[in-house]
Image (tube, grey):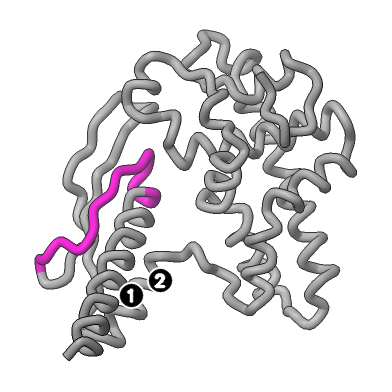
Amino acid sequence: MIPEQIPLKNNELFRLAVTHRSATTDVVQSSYERLEFFGDAILGFVIAQYLYEHHPDWNQGMLSKARSSVVQEGPLAEASLKLKIDDALILGPGEESTGGRSRPSILADVFESIVGAIYLESGMEKARWFILEQLQPYLEHISTGDVDPYDFKSKLQVIAQDAWRKTPAYRLVKEEGHIHSKIFTIQVLFDNEIMGEATGRSRKEAEHLAAKNAMELIRRTMDSRERYRRED
């Protein structure tokens, strides 16, 4: 069943847009990968046009960083979850058992494939409306000048340097799965103390999520210290 907020009527097209390669033997014709490729191009164009029109004072570097921050995995995966696309995903048994339904990389890919499907069914204006409607919170955030809010590794490094004059280190703990569906587990450490750990479909994704978890731990620790200070 097509979620209410997705402007698609063709059930077969929607089914194609949410079918992972693990659920079919014909990856080219029966999975979302071609639609994802197509939707990625449309998404990039729409966001680039929006930024160009709404931020005439930004130079090329600012525009490029802002576009990258909006069309990356984090915002797209969150948008998919809000649309309840995770419930509609069609996965193979192996992908299902390893948490594919909540995997950010898959959720982000499917958001792009759905953009491609909307364009094929209804054209650019409907696709543009859908993209801007779903990603508006992220576009509003970067208008403040924070053009890369999801770069957790860089933000963690700044925090670590400011607070402790130290640089976080990333350690590969585990690598498992088949060659085309590997899962990586990464830890981020300060002086060999584990501050965050996460898994991902690539080392980059796992490092990104581990840095995010470390930042959340630091924030909770600082909040607790501030609360105790006020109570004293």
**Residue identified by numbered label 1:** 157
Horizontal side of 45 relative to 167 (left or right) equals right
Quarter assignment of residue 223? bottom left
Question: In the image shown, does 45 or 129 lie closer to the viewer?
Answer: 129
- Quadrant of residue 88 within the rendered picture: top right
Residue most extreme to the top? 25
What percent of the width, then of the height, locates residue 119? 82, 34
> Magenta span has 182?
no
Residue reaching furthest to the front = 231
Q: CA distance from mark 2 to mark 1?
A: 5 Å
Q: What residue do we see at 60% from left, 24% from top?
A: 18
From this view, report whether residue 148 is shown above or below residue 121. Answer: below
Screen quadrant of the N terminus: top right
Q: Is residue 145 left or right of residue 222?
A: right
Image side of residue 168 versus residue 88, left or right: left
Quadrant including the C terminus: bottom left
Q: Which residue is mark 2?
A: 154
Residue at 26% across, 84% down = 226
Q: Secondary structure at mark 2?
A: helix
